[in-house]
Image (cartoon, rainbow, N blue to C red):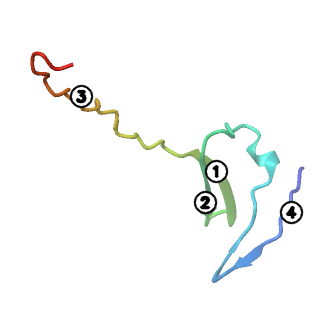
Amino acid sequence: MVEIKRKLYKRGSSFETTVPMPLLFAIDKSKKHYVVFKYDDSSNRWYVELEKMEEEKEESSEEEPEQKEEPSKKEGEP
């Protein structure tokens, strides 16, 4: 059995810890994830799951730039 211990840190009015790298072996580290903690009452155990964050679809702001019309030149002007 593998055992991993992590320190529990107090931060303001809550507590936090880090997720050890051995638990992250199977995820794509270039993408963002949620760490989900689930508690099972019947077995009195906690489970940790990793879920990919859904990428927000960025609306295309690639509008065509307005073309500036050159002032019409009168005949005879350079």
Circle 1 sits on which residue?
49
Name which residue type carries label 4.
Answer: Lys
The image position of residue 52, as x and y in percent, is 56, 43
Q: Earlier in the sequence, mark 4 or mark 2?
A: 4
Kindly identify which numbered label has been placed on residue 5.
4
Observer-nearest of 69 and 15: 69
Q: Nearer the viewer, mark 3 or mark 4?
A: 3
Q: Earlier in the sequence, mark 1 or mark 3?
A: 1
Residue 72 vertical position relative to residue 32 in the rendered view, above or below:
above
- Helix, strand or loop under label 1: strand
Name which residue type carries label 1.
Answer: Glu
- How far is the residue under mark 1 from the one under mark 3? 52 Å
Q: Earlier in the sequence, mark 3 or mark 2?
A: 2
Name which residue type carries label 2.
Answer: Lys
Circle 2 sits on which residue?
38
Circle 3 sits on which residue?
67
The image position of residue 66, as x and y in percent, is 24, 32
